[in-house]
Amino acid sequence: MLVQSWTTIQTEIKPKQNTSSEPVVLENNSIKVIVDTKSGTFQVTEKKSGQIWNPDPWENAAGILTIKDSKGKSQDVNISNSESIVVNKKDETTVSISFNNPKLNNNTIASGVSIKTEIRLTPTKLDVEVISYEACNNKLVELRYPARAFSLETDVDKGAAVIPQKQGVICPSYIFPMNGGRFCMWDDATYYGRSKGKLPLFNNNIGLSMPWWGTYNEKSAVIGIIDESARPSMFFNINNNGQYLFTPKGIMSPNKRIEFLDPVWNLNRKNEKKIISYQFIPNGTHVEMAKVYRKEAIKRGYFVSLKDKAKRDPDVKKLQGAIYMGLYGGYPHYVEMPGMAFNFKDLSNIINTTHNDLGVDNAFFHAWGVFSNFVPNCWPINENLGGVAGLKEAVDLTKKYGYLYSSYHAYSATLENDPEFNTGLFAKRKDGKLINTNSRWANIDQNKQLGLAKKSLHKEIAALGLEADITDISFATYPDEDNTGLFNLAKYIDSLNLVNGTEHGQQQWIPYFDMFEGMTYKNSNLWEFSHPAPLFNLVYHDAIAVFGKIQDPDNQMSKYGDFKVKSLRNILYGIGTTIFFSPYEFDGMKDMIKMANEVVSPVNKETFFEELISHEYLSADFNLQKTTFSSNTEVMVNIGPVKQTTPNGITIPAFGYQVKFKNGKIKKGQFKTSI
Amino acid sequence: MLVQSWTTIQTEIKPKQNTSSEPVVLENNSIKVIVDTKSGTFQVTEKKSGQIWNPDPWENAAGILTIKDSKGKSQDVNISNSESIVVNKKDETTVSISFNNPKLNNNTIASGVSIKTEIRLTPTKLDVEVISYEACNNKLVELRYPARAFSLETDVDKGAAVIPQKQGVICPSYIFPMNGGRFCMWDDATYYGRSKGKLPLFNNNIGLSMPWWGTYNEKSAVIGIIDESARPSMFFNINNNGQYLFTPKGIMSPNKRIEFLDPVWNLNRKNEKKIISYQFIPNGTHVEMAKVYRKEAIKRGYFVSLKDKAKRDPDVKKLQGAIYMGLYGGYPHYVEMPGMAFNFKDLSNIINTTHNDLGVDNAFFHAWGVFSNFVPNCWPINENLGGVAGLKEAVDLTKKYGYLYSSYHAYSATLENDPEFNTGLFAKRKDGKLINTNSRWANIDQNKQLGLAKKSLHKEIAALGLEADITDISFATYPDEDNTGLFNLAKYIDSLNLVNGTEHGQQQWIPYFDMFEGMTYKNSNLWEFSHPAPLFNLVYHDAIAVFGKIQDPDNQMSKYGDFKVKSLRNILYGIGTTIFFSPYEFDGMKDMIKMANEVVSPVNKETFFEELISHEYLSADFNLQKTTFSSNTEVMVNIGPVKQTTPNGITIPAFGYQVKFKNGKIKKGQFKTSI
């Protein structure tokens, strides 16, 4: 109360340029922000928990500017080392700051360089914005702002950095028990360059799938949501002491290990809004952060529920508990590839076996390799493999069994080894040079893709009576350009009112699709010092069905797990089983398909339309985890080799699970390896 | 015969400068080399098989020179585009070539630049050497020479590139059946930059463990062995069409996909011999190549047999069939780390359980975390954990059971979090700047390491009555510098006449050690388009015992496999099981330890002192493999999920094995996952 009235007094003072060294304060019921007038950095107190978020603990930098000198050499400078820093309380809720003439590393001045920012405190959030900047005769490249804010101190703060890379990870800020070999990598990584880097937005490789991130400790959490238009990258520094800043000087870093996540604003993009909005959550974790973003995602229009999608097309219900069966016949890479191709009799046999022998209730068959042409010409159906009649027989079987079926389609790629390889489809520069020569799956101009789809998709639907479509690749990213061409393709596919799937996926495409194949995990350095967390599903589980990635299907082992670990993660997150195989492998898939049908499908069937409400790590080693869905379904899994016991005394064996279904029934089990 | 006499005639002609455009020929019974006088490239015919190895199929370059212009910008130029190329038959067996004034990419001339090479044909090999070079006013960086020689054409040649990265891989030059997801990565990688790159020698990360490589197809094989002194890197291009050369121009590559391996000579190293010696093996594969190098390794003095080592110290026999049990207590990273540390009673209990309950006959216990100090001060034994008496009890148990024991030691690292962290131990530049600030495990000056070992190792041996020692890290690389300090440390450890082990290892250290922990596999791009192959073991199996890598132990899953795949590879290659765990994980390790004791140990016990004679891939998908050892032990394993049948009609189930022991007994089995 006292604090509040003090704020009121402050606001009565007319805004004027701050010339004293007194800090400038913004404050409301829950947050107090103190801006240091010397450095332009700020401290935030979240009042309920008492958490104080201090500015950059290494060099008290408000921001880090990358600037190129006249010789084209770039350097990073701390903008708090500027000739003049002007902090001005514009009004009750706004502080403006300008950083003028920053010092370069050789102690000369980058004269004429000026950066203006604003910090605005609203009742619900703290906006931090880069308002404008002047380069004068210098070249400004990018700005990390705010820099090293909301950082955690390693092994002092017990918390994590939360990063929605693909499905999502958390990077704990403290040591905890884990496998010794894993720990060696974990601890060492934090002293090496691997634990810092930049991640782009909406990229299929190592990018962020959602425009937010944050940190939390035992007291409080902070999430920053960015305006997407400026397409900042995210800089991460995970339990790293910044040795990378000192190695060129031949000295050791004097810094503590910390973790922080910074927005990196591309200063070549002059017109886009460079704003990050922070929200503070007492006692929050990655779950509450994801739920804050869920509200924002709904506001931004990315959220259309699976329930609504199923109302429009009841076949969406066939995805409930479905096993995604990707049968790879060498296509799209090759047509009738020796050793890999299947014919339509083979396909029918596999469908029959899956239903009759393996007892699978729900499946989505995706057949890679049914056309005589290469992508993007997905027509005609290959006569050598059995023609329309042969393939229709297989499709009819899927319908009879209540399964879904799609052939493989892509309109974004023309392949070098295709006899009809056509650079005429490529996106080109004004000077005629080809763009994306080095990205074979995205070389076709996005504005030509709708036309390619319209050439044949309707013929295939008519010939086979299709109820589902998978269009690969085009929507694996959300390119940083005018995406009208991709939206036109998405809208066309959506207009067909089939069950629509696409590879990987990005949130912008959720309104047009029912399933994403691959919003799981992909190799990146983060793996060495993070834990998978279902961030994407905490936001979108009830809006889009997620299945595994074909390059890392549940039947293959990778550093993200083997069949047992991936199956346990599937029930925990509400992700559908993906079995992706070449025809000759089918016999070897059978045991896994049966196990998935028994363990994974019943849980996903029950939770399919439900919100993923919570996710917790219940053991010190993070292996014992629990989620709940809005159906009150509770899933507990242990993804480690050692049995674990919950704080409530429930023991889950190694690679075991316990599911409490909404009717109260409890199912327990365990994956075992034996000779 | 006819050919021979023709050669004789040739040699009677007096050597003179070749001014005509007639090719120059070197020839013997088995090899004919034709040097093109215009380009300076050469073609090799291996007569027995008729295999013709053509020069660079992309641009007929003899070599690729990286040169820096006056502005410091570097470019790659084809030295066959030179103002003058002089090919001269010096004598019967030698052609000298000089490339003078190469053309730069802007069509100007790098005047004064000259490169002189020699090609020499001896009865057994073809030596290709960079004799000298002149830079004049230019800066020469490196030279790939010969460039793109001995290449395979993708999907035309049925063969592989053979690369001794760590334990070794082969990169097939053709498509074959494999998992669909794996294939997508495989095929795509070859159009992207990931399938080309440079690998250094003798580096613990992605380096080559032996100084050779080669290619083979269905007809013939060629291996190039390099003189190590010049420390060339190896450039690889695996089934890549060189799009990377054309993407900057905005056009598609007109080239065919090929694979080749080039030596890259560092031209800053003026005095070292830049020579690669090729040998040709009709019908050869990776096995015959490894055996060619085995002879060279013996000649170079790297090969000392385990039999001889066991004669000197009979305790070496305790490694036969041993399970390597790494108990990680948070050390060397931390001392008495909460949640990870064990005390000596715990250690004794684990040893007892391993022997009495799990029935393990042979084991090597490696205890990480027994000292009160951090590395490199491996003394005193921690009183809080039980002191000398407590640890001696554990060590005595290992002796009683016929096991080996070592504490963890390292003398190459002082850690940032050690209260006694000491930059005084660092290697330093002349100006006092610290070297290796960014490599925490190699920051100590190699010349100080012997002194650090001598401070305490003898005390520990005396106190505990040790029979084995593991000294970590120091020998994980073979640095490109004067290695007297490391040799002094190796010699000292060797002089103690214990069973000596070291992390990872390099061939240069084989004479001083009995076991290498970690000459297996580590992450690199090669994984996407290669198959593991036991190249190191084909050369050195009977000279050094190899166990798994602690960051990727058999109990952990990675892209190189999970417990079952790694166990199968262990018996196939003759690698010992590694179980690396934190104390709290021990209960979860028990089943795996029992399975390893049953499946892996009996095979390794029989093959321990034997040469690994052969290794074959018997199924089209490379999953069914067979090895034989000099004991006549035959091992067949199937590391895939689908049963496979040999050409002789023997069927091996998914993740199954069949071992024929030297007494003729056959043992079959299979790893299974179930719920």
Image (tube, coloured by chain):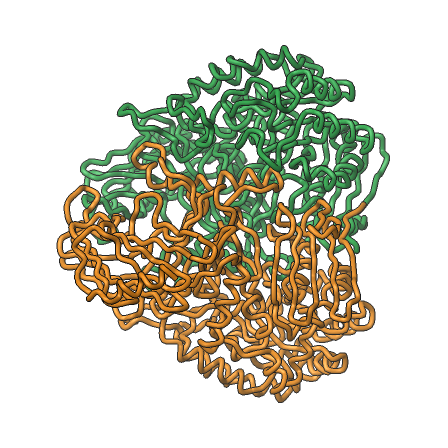
Chain colours: A orange, B green
Residue sitting at x 51%, y 24%: B375
- Percent of width and height locating residue A599: 75, 63
In this orientation, does residue B81 appear? Answer: yes
Q: Is residue B351 left or right of residue B664?
A: left
**Quadrant of residue B668 within the rendered picture:** top right
Which residue is drawn at the image coordinates 16% and 52% (left, top)?
A84
**Residue B525 vertical placement versus B179 (above, below):** above
Q: Nearer the viewer, residue B501 or A148?
A: A148
The answer to whether residue A576 is left or right of residue A140 is right
In percent of width and height, residue A14 lies at 19, 66
Corner quadrant of residue A662: bottom right
**Quarter of the C terminus of chain B within the rendering:** bottom right
Q: Where does the N terminus of chain B fall, quadrant-wise?
A: top right
Residue A356, percent across and down? 82, 72
Q: Is residue B252 left or right of residue A518?
A: left
Nearest the viewer among A231 and A42 is A42
Q: Residue at x 60, y 87 (%)?
A: A312
